[in-house]
Amino acid sequence: MIEVDSIHKSFGEAHILKGVSTVFETGKTNLIIGQSGSGKTVFLKCLLGLFSPEEGSIIYDGQKYADLTSQEQRDLRQDMGMVFQGSALFDGMTVAGNVMFPLEMFTKLAKSEMEDRVDIVLKRVNLVDAHHKYPSEISGGMQKRVAIARAIVMNPQYLFCDEPNSGLDPRTAIVIDNLIKEITEEYDITTVINTHDMNSVMEIGEKILFLKDGLKEWEGTKNEIFKTDNKAVTDFVYSSELFKKVRQMYIEERN
Amino acid sequence: MKYLSDIGSYAIMVIEVFRKPTKWRIMKTLILKEIDELIYGSLGILIFISFFIGAVVAIQTAMNITNDLIPKNLVGFATRQSIILEFAPTFCSIIMAGKVGSFITSSIGTMRVTEQIDALEVMGINALNYLVFPKIIALLLYPFIIAIAMYVGIFGGWFAGVFGGFSTSADFIEGLKLDFIPFHVTYSFIKTLVFAFLLATIPSFHGFYMKGGALEVGKASTTSFVWTSVVIIIANYILTQLLLT
């Protein structure tokens, strides 16, 4: 579980996060949504420890990040897996090399044990024949799956995903969404996803946090998002005709 | 103010490079890879340039000897002094700022743009140690290729001097031995080691702290080349003042 208590973050004159508080529960897919410039990425980078908030605190299963020593912070980071928007795979390494990288850096496993572990996670993300290919030789969807495999290879407690569906076709996007949801439940981890994709919101949004201008505007579940009267949320989520109709049908069905 | 801030950031970066070292098992592979890319990969161009620079120095010296009182061995002497003192260590380092420096900035800059550096940091890895330290260690071998450049440069001078009819082989070799001061070679290697450090760290600084996209990677490579060259030239002056006067 990650507890965020009133965090503030500024860059020079720009006050990006203005006191955001929330709780991300373990075993659930937690989504952060909001318009571009609402502070989602900064918020995610604060959760990852890449940015230090000026005020407020972030508590990971009872451990307040700011109170940890730098060694403890590094140890905690090894419990975090991250799937970047562009996958961020290392160009000079093969798929297997990318997935094995955290194991080589942080464990004392024998080479054969590492290879077994890599096989298991690549199989888990449905990539069985790509071990020796380089990132430039595989599709965007496969790159995302490799990034997920790399993120989970160390059995993390926390999984963060920054727009995991960007640049993917709708069908592959659903596959990636479902994969993340399955892994979250299977490994019982705390997953936080930063997304623009409303399909993801409807599919896997067990908890949704809506940010607007650096503030928490709304939070709830995917079912609650159909019922909410919050204008900022409805304007954002139901901006397309398709989603307006879906919402209308949902309300009519309920009535 | 920006320059002062950049100098401060550069100094902090250099300190950070030596902290939280990466596992030796992984670092060893990275160092060997960098030796292959930065040192072995530069050998061809440096040999090519050195040969022709040596040749041109020999021809130009010979063309300027119009007085019969000036001994013919001056061609060998001037070629040796020019190559050992300046052309091999400094001129080659400027070439390397273009070749190796741009490569370092663009490769690290691309890693920044594609979030690969963020990925390293999220894993708790000291990205500066992982990326820059192997380059510094690899470039410790830089004096070896400069030694080859010296040899090839002088050979180029001999080749052009003798086969161009500007000097006899005996005169040229006599000139090479004339008033030879071994410390000049030491001075040259000291300079080379300092330039090697600058070649590894300044382009890394420009790549690591760049912001933006692909266009900015190109701009950072250009800026890196300019600044590496400027700092090498300033360092050359300071070291010459300190070591030769």
Image (cartoon, rainbow, N blue to C red):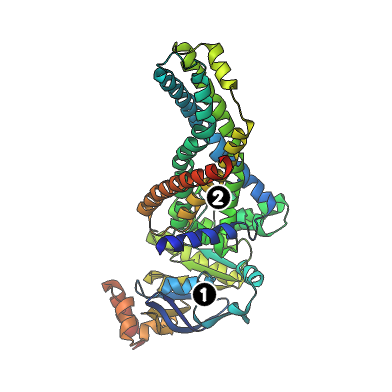
Residue at 62% in and 34% down: B183
The residue tagged 2 is: A95
Q: What element carries label 1?
A: loop
Q: Is mark 2 on a helix, strand or loop?
A: helix
Which chain is mark 1 on? Answer: A
- In the rendered view, tell whether residue A33 sits above or below residue A56: above
- In the rendered view, tell whether residue A37 sits above or below residue A115: below
Residue at 50% in and 78% down: A53
Q: In which quarter of the image is the C terminus of chain B?
A: top right
Q: Is residue B196 left or right of residue A245?
A: right
Query: Mark 2 and mark 1: span between their CA atoms?
Result: 32 Å
- In the rendered view, tell whether residue B92 sits above or below residue A113: above
- Which one is closest to the eye, mark 2 or mark 1? 1
- Between residues A129 and A220, which one lies in front from this camera angle? A220
Residue flagged by tag 2: what amino acid is it?
Val
Residue at 56% in and 52% down: B131
Residue at 32% in and 79% down: A247
- Between residues B229 and A137, which one lies in front from this camera angle? B229
Which chain is mark 2 on? Answer: A
- Between residues B42 and B49, which one lies in front from this camera angle? B49
Q: Where is residue A31 in the image (x, y as percent from the top left)?
A: 46, 75
The residue tagged 1 is: A52
Q: Residues within 10 Å of mark 1 (few under 14, many from 20)?
A: many
Residue flagged by tag 1: what amino acid is it?
Ser
Q: Position of residue A113 (x, y in %)?
A: 71, 53
First along the sequence among labels 2 and 1 = 1
Q: Position of residue B107 (x, y in %)?
A: 47, 48
Instruction: Tell me, yes or no, if residue A85 can be seen here.
Output: no
- Between residues A250 and B110, which one lies in front from this camera angle? B110
